[in-house]
Image (cartoon, rainbow, N blue to C red):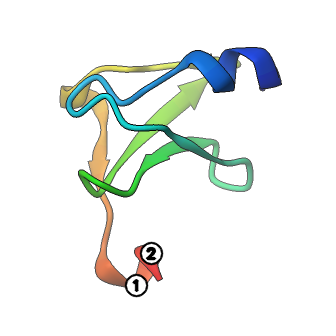
Amino acid sequence: MDKRLLDILVCPLCKSQLQLDAVKGELICKADRLAYPIRDDVPVMLVDEARTLSSDELA
């Protein structure tokens, strides 16, 4: 994912900074415990499409 794009993307729910998980192909919002998928190099920034992170994944 392009670093410039990652710098401007924020969580649509709380507006906090996102972290890239390149292995899983997701953008992580630790504040809301959500992982937004990246499909075909396009981040899907819809809360309904995000999955909830377990406490193990946040550690």
- The percent coordinates of residue 16 (x first, y second) are 37, 37
Residue 40 visible within the image:
no
Vertical side of 10 occupied by 54: above or below = below
Residue 46 visible within the image:
yes
Q: Residue at x 20, y 29 (%)?
A: 13
Q: Residue at x 32, y 63 (%)?
A: 53
Q: Residue at x 58, y 17 (%)?
A: 8
Q: Which residue is mark 2?
A: 57
> Counting other residues with Cα less than 10 Å from the Cα at mark 1, is it few (<14), some (14-19), or many (20 or more)?
few
Q: Are marks 1 and 2 in contact (CB under 8 Å)?
A: yes
Please indicate whether residue 10 sits to the left or right of residue 41 in the image: left
Quadrant of the rendering where the N terminus is positioned: top right
Q: Nearer the viewer, residue 32 or 44?
A: 32
The disc label shown at residue 14, or none: none
- Amino acid type, mark 1: Asp
Count the numbered circles shown. Answer: 2
Please indicate whether residue 22 sits to the left or right of residue 48 in the image: right
Vertical side of 59 occupied by 47: above or below = above
Name which quarter of the figure residue 57 lies in.
bottom left
- The percent coordinates of residue 50 (x first, y second) are 30, 38
Q: Which residue is mark 1?
A: 56
Q: Nearer the viewer, residue 18 or 40?
A: 18
Q: Nearer the viewer, residue 45 or 14?
A: 14
